[in-house]
Amino acid sequence: MLRSLRTRLTLLFAGTLLLATVIAGAASIRLYQSYNRDQTANELRSQVGGAAEYFDAALNAYGTNQHPPTRATVGQIESICGCHVLYTGNVPPFPVGGRLISFAGKGVAWQTMRPDDRVTFQFQPPGSDRTYIGVAAPLAARGQQVGAIVMAKPLADVNRAWTKVAGRVAIGTGIGLLVAFILATFVARRITRPLKELGAAADRVARGDLEVHVAGDRTSDDELGQLAHRFQGMVDRLREVDELERNFLMRVTHELRTPVTAISGHVQAMNEGLVGPEDMDTSLDAVSEEVRRIGRLVDDLLDLTRLEAHQFRLVREEVGLEALLEQAAASFRDRARANEVSFDTPIAGAPTILSDGDRVLQIVSNLLDNAFRWTPRKGTVTLSYATANSTAAIHISDTG
């Protein structure tokens, strides 16, 4: 199943979205914890001032007829603010019946604090394994600074505050992942559908069916659409090549049938004694000419095979152009007389060239054959040449 591109794309999209969700969730938790710490510090900062004023008044009343705060009073303060009340200083502010307020340690320099200072810090009280975040405000008794009151909350409780909304976040994340998976499946299907169509079309082409159409006016212009257009162009060219090959085979068959029929007719006439001794040479010459014609067709087929196999070779040699053109013209003079076509050959004085003489002769013969085929009676075929800048050009023109 994992070999399917659609499945792998779906898992890739879903996995990417899941990874992004996890990263975003982790970042959100960190941001929420930082935000919650800031909010907690602000809340403690707003509360510690009132507590400091209360304990300042209690310290100033200490030793008079007024009574200092009791343990229940401290508990009430902690219950109201939802935090712990501690102190830091050289001596406990209320050394009556033991410590009424826990010692926060020496995590803040209370000696240098101004009356309106509020210092936020993290600390671990002596004898405790818990870390707290607290805000300190200075304490003074009869004009002398004696320490600082600290209102604090356990840092672990502050950091775990995100668990209160974790359920809702998990539900939202689950819904989001479900929607993302459905969307990933839809996108993967949209991507792989053209590929499946191209695969089916390729199978049809492999079976020899070239009547396939995978691109049209409504094909998208993205990478898959461009691939479909290129595939369609390839199929169209294969169709053209196939048509050309069929036409070529038909023409070759026709060309071979003509000389074979002629040879068969002459051989049958000679076998049946219909050709007399005086006509025997003529019939043999005709058979020989048709054999040469078959040989030329076979050579053409071999040349075509070499061209397709990229094995076609040209021989570069000195060739007398006048003699070559005369050889080509001599093969068509009888045809020109039979068709009552004027055949002009102003080729005298043609230079010597460096080329493949056999191939040049083949080209000229093919062009002359085409010219005589389409030139009507009383028409004109001209074979000539021209030279310029050490280059020779052969010209064949007709009135067909």
Image (cartoon, rainbow, N blue to C red):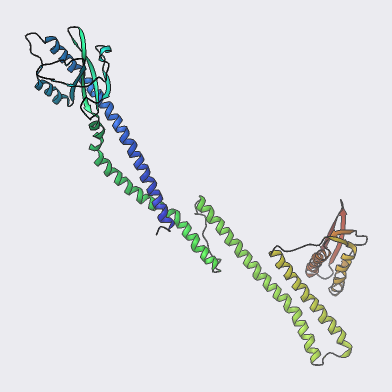
Left or right: residue 182 compared with residue 321: left
- The residue sitting at the left extreme is 65
Name the image quarter holding the C terminus. Answer: bottom right
- Above or below, comparing residue 11 to residue 150 in the picture: below
- The residue sitting at the top extreme is 143
Q: Can I make out residue 344 in this image?
A: no
Q: Position of residue 2 (x, y in %)?
A: 41, 57
Q: Locate residue 377: give its quadrant.
A: bottom right
How many numbered marks, from 0 up? 0
Q: Position of residue 277 (x, y in %)?
A: 88, 90
* Front-lying residue, 103 or 346: 103
* Front-lying residue, 272 or 291: 291
- Above or below, comparing residue 372 to residue 93 in the picture: below
Q: Position of residue 300 (x, y in %)?
A: 75, 70
Q: Locate residue 36: give its quadrant.
A: top left
At a point 62% along the width and 67% down the height, the residue shown is 242
Left or right: residue 50 compared with residue 200: left
- The residue sitting at the bottom extreme is 273
- The residue sitting at the right extreme is 349
- Above or below, comparing residue 348 to residue 100 in the picture: below
At a point 41% along the width and 54% down the height, the residue shown is 8
- Above or below, comparing residue 211 to residue 129 in the picture: below
Name the image quarter holding the N terminus. Answer: bottom left
Left or right: residue 303 compared with residue 379: left
Q: Can I make out residue 294 in this image?
A: yes
Q: Locate residue 151: give its quadrant.
A: top left
Q: Position of residue 193 (x, y in %)?
A: 45, 57
* Front-lying residue, 340 or 203: 203
